[in-house]
Image (cartoon, rainbow, N blue to C red):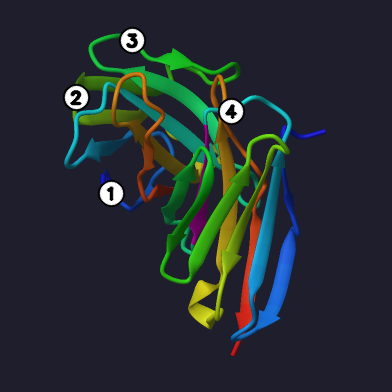
Amino acid sequence: KNEVEQSPQNLTAQEGEFITINCSYSVGISALHWLQQHPGGGIVSLFMLSSGKKKHGRLIATINIQEKHSSLHITASHPRDSAVYICAVSSAKIIFGKGTRLHILP
Amino acid sequence: GAVVSQHPSWVICKSGTSVKIECRSLDFQATTMFWYRQFPKQSLMLMATSNEGSKATYEQGVEKDKFLINHASLTLSTLTVTSAHPEDSSFYICSAIRDRGLDTQYFGPGTRLTVL
């Protein structure tokens, strides 16, 4: 079993839909990262959080340390949100999930 | 917010040549930088940890003589792929820790290497 599990692996939705991507981990962590990787490969750090909730524009990230679970939400999704979203946790070293491929249809 | 840059963003080279990739922290000093590699449709994998002024620590299975890492200053780490081969074609990403003892890690945008 991977130490960082993301779900779903793939997600296709219509423009405007509310999107949730989940991340569960099995190790003790000091922080959790959400990254966005565009088709060209470029990576953008979306959030780094160790507790609670953070919001940036239409993106919201939450983490529950006790349950070892984090969610990334996208409100009013748009085709430009189409990308791979990666969850990574900082433990003894950083461990990446396999990513969730999101495709928003216009 | 903290910014980490990489240069070049993409590079194509012939087999047998060496390629240098730079990772810079633009507005902070990074005592530690990390280098990752990502093959198509796979997760990012840590290659090595680079500490300023000391030798890099390589992960198991990563050839230190092939992937030369230099962290000569607090804002710059370089990864040199020596005698590159087509199997080295990959996406290379760096990240930098902003504050010693704090887990503030910022990722570079990545460099796509294609070896012909």
Which chain is mark 3 on?
B
Residue corresponding to mark 4: A29
Residue depicted at 29% across the width and 31% down the height: B98
N-terminal of the pair, mark 2 or mark 3, is 3
Amino acid bearing label 2: Leu
1 and 2 marks on the same chain: yes
4 and 2 marks on the same chain: no
C-alpha separation, residue under disc 2 versus residue under disc 3: 14 Å
User: Is label 4 in contact with label 1 (beta carbons under 8 Å)?
Assistant: no
Q: Is there any visible trace of residue A99 in the rendered image? A: yes
Residue depicted at 31% across the width and 20% down the height: B100
Give neighbour class at mark 3: few <14, some 14-19, many 20+ (Cα, 10 Å). Answer: few
Amino acid bearing label 3: Lys
A33 is within the stretch colored magenta: yes
Which chain is mark 4 on?
A
Q: Of the residues tagged 3 and 1, which is closer to the observer?
A: 3
C-alpha separation, residue under disc 4 versus residue under disc 1: 32 Å
C-alpha separation, residue under disc 4 versus residue under disc 3: 26 Å
N-terminal of the pair, mark 1 or mark 2, is 1
Question: Is A59 left or right of B40, judged from the image as shown?
Answer: left
Residue B43 at what x, y percent from top left? 62, 43
Residue corresponding to mark 3: B55
As helix, strand or loop, the secondary structure at mark 3 comes to loop
Q: Of the residues tagged 4 and 3, which is closer to the observer?
A: 4
Magenta stretch secondary structure, dominant: strand
Residue B3 at what x, y percent from top left? 26, 46
Residue depicted at 60% across the width and 86% down the height: A15
Q: Residue furthest bottom?
A: A106
Residue range (magenta): A31-37
Amino acid bearing label 4: Ile
C-alpha separation, residue under disc 3 versus residue under disc 1: 23 Å
